[in-house]
Image (tube, grey):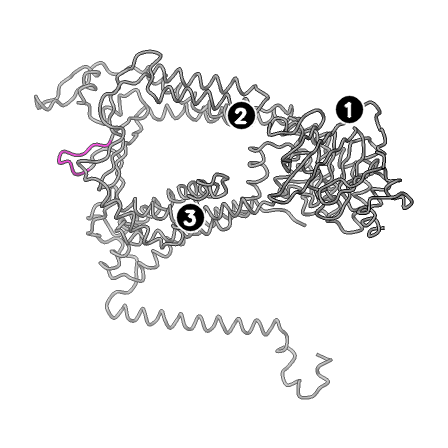
Amino acid sequence: MQMRAETPGENVLPAVFRDGRILQGIAQLCFVLIVVLVLNDLSTRITTALEATNQSPNFEFLQNRAGFGIADSGDYQSSDRYIDAFRVGFINTLRVVLLGLVATTAIGIMVGIFLLSSNYLVRTISRAYVEVLRNTPVLLQIIAWFFIAIFALPPQQDAIAFPIEGIRSLPLLQYALSLFIIFVIWQYSGGLRNLIWRTRIRQGGIAIVVLVNLLGIVLVGAGSPLEFRPGLYISIKGVAIFELIPSSMFGIWMVFVVIGLVVAALMWRYFAYVTESTGKPIPRTRYAIASVIGFALLGWVVLGMRPTPTTIAVFDEEQDSTVDMPYEDAFESGLLTIEQELEYTRQPLIYRPPTLDRRGRNIETGIEISPSYLAVFLGLVIYTSAFIAEIVRAGIQAVPKGQLEASRALGISQGEMLRLIILPQALRVIIPPLGNQYLNLAKNSSLAIAVSYTDIYQVSNTIINQSGQSVTGIVMIMFSYLFISLSISLVMNLVNQRFQLVTR
Amino acid sequence: MEDGTRQVMAGDEPIIICRDMNKWFGEFHVLRNISLEVMPQEVLVIIGPSGSGKSTFIRCINRLEEHQDGQIIVDGIELSHDVQNIADIRRETGMVFQQFNLFPHLTVMDNISLAPMKVRHWARDKAEQRAMELLERVGIPEQAFKYPGQLSGGQQQRVAIARALAMEPKIMLFDEPTSALDPEMIKEVLDVMTELARTYMTLLVVTHEMGFAREVADRIIFMDMGRIVEQGPPENFFNPDIEHHPRTQEFLDQIL
């Protein structure tokens, strides 16, 4: 101030207005003022226009009767309210996004690792996968999947079924014995110090056992006839899968499973402590898995000993009346209602294969997945997986070669090098762009409208058209996507924090 | 000129034997007929111009590079495609790199104790106690719980030496350990290496530090174009009165 003030004419402005901080503050204030004025004007105009047509924004209309049906809707009826329709749409979006994130991550990581494979064929095929998929629009891919579902799949009465229905004879005893032999080979060869012979014995032994079984050679025991009923149908109407319904025994069985989990967690920590204090390596993952499976099986067996009622009242269609009959007979003849079966069964979960109703049109039991859902799901998952594959490849390649050399020079094994050295450093590079792809998948799910999948955007569109509540509708769509996106960001930021490096 | 190897342990078997070793990078013949024996407790310094194959040579000894012809026997174990032999040899040799190659996501302590715990199956207590002893030996025990990114280059290289020593190797390989360091940090690393030489460990050092070579080496190997041109004890090698191979003379004239 003193220095500059010497020259006359430059001192026109008081010193306060030559302070950079104050100038910046004034500029920001002006900007905020302009934005507020513009927004205020805009909202006044919109409100006036809507009021003129008697459509001023409010949320009360959500309680009105919707009056339209939704394809993938669970228990929703067209007589339900708008808010219920909106909820169905939101859940449908979540169904695509949540399952889609898991699936696209799995495929993306796999293809990403394949991109770095030393096998020429694997590397080239995965490169082609990535280049084709990430260079075509996702909308096109979703529609392509929809057309594949509609034109390539058989009509419902000729649905592709798996496993094929019928009675087949399988040498179950031999299968059990084969598994046991593989287990013994694996355990025995684990003691071999020579890695080459260990690999040879393991791969060779298992190959022989598998080959004998695949060729259908029956060496031990006779085949036991087994009745197969399809658990999966694929047709033009989508995919129908069996369902597992928890019975009245499910709660008690879950107690066993939880005990198995607790024991597994305790063993996990105890064995970690033993390894730390003695250095002895213990395969704790195997023991933990064995504990959970063991307790689950134990629970299944214990519950199997529960007595069932000797007689039960069932409705006999032929006699058109309720009759008492032995429980086993009722079960065999399929006269038990699902409620009775759930109440008196010995199994914690009841397996129900997909069946059609009498007219052969709609699925009566089992889980149904519509072609629209499949198209959106596959389109998003496969498109996004191509980007994730590239991110994973780049992340692994970003770990300097020197890190691998240092691990090798120390004698660290290939698996431990991947787990302890490469992955922690690769994840640091992978996680931020991975989060972006997750957000892309979530937002791209609004393309569901192209194949009439009833996601939040499609349902809200119908609501807006019917009720005229466009402002409210768009605000609700916006907040729904915002909620999903911010949740993903939050999780990814938390994960990201764990992998950051400490420098300086 | 006669082989001037100081017989450190007379009558002992050589710990490293190379016979007619050859290596190519594609068409490029990097190592030509290298034959060499290293005795236990010997300090071998390998010098030569850039691209002479000296780094490639010591990287062959723990199989970071694969040799295509000839034989390498380390501590009685022959290096081949046998993964078990490779694992055994790597357990006997420690290596220090030009670029340190510390694990940036692990603390100094974890960097040092990781391999003993995972490869030698030591208890954590034992591995960490040993790591602390080694950090004291290289003079930076106070840095144990920092991350590599928080240390200076010289400190990082000393951690890298401690990390290699933690596996209790019989042989230490140094691949230009001071080339990436500021001049004032070079001394602290060379001091640690000099101290190591006094403990009678077998050392193979690729370096451009002629002072270190002159003071510490038992034998100096001069390599050029993938060949061992000349070898001898430092007092002969740096003696201007002795007649050298013309290529050695040219190299010595440039650096001395």
Mark 1: few/some/many CA within 10 Å (<14, 14-19, 20+)? some
Task: State which region is magenta.
Answer: A354-362
Residue B36 percent across, percent down from the top left: 75, 33
Quadrant the N terminus of chain B occupies: top right
Which of the two discs, 1 and 3, sits closer to the camera? 1
Give the CA distance from mark 3 to mark 2: 37 Å
Residue B130 percent across, percent down from the top left: 73, 31
| For residue A152, side relative to residue B105 (left or right) | left
**Secondary element type, mark 3:** helix
| For residue A371, side relative to residue B246 (left or right) | left
The single residue placed furthest to the bottom in the displayed view is: A8
Question: Relative to A75, is A176 above or below?
Answer: above
Pointer 1 chain: B
Residue A56 percent across, percent down from the top left: 28, 65
Between B184 and B245, the one nearer to me in the picture: B245
| For residue B80, side relative to residue A111 (left or right) | right
**Secondary element type, mark 2:** helix
Magenta-drawn stretch contains A357: yes
Between B172 and B187, the one nearer to me in the picture: B172
Question: Relative to A154, is A254 above or below?
Answer: above
Which residue bears the numbered disc 1? B13
Both labels 3 and 2 in a single chain? yes
The single residue placed furthest to the top in the displayed view is: A221
Magenta-drawn stretch contains A292: no
Pointer 2 chain: A
Predominant SS of the magenta segment: loop
Mark 3: few/some/many CA within 10 Å (<14, 14-19, 20+)? many
Which residue bears the numbered disc 2? A284
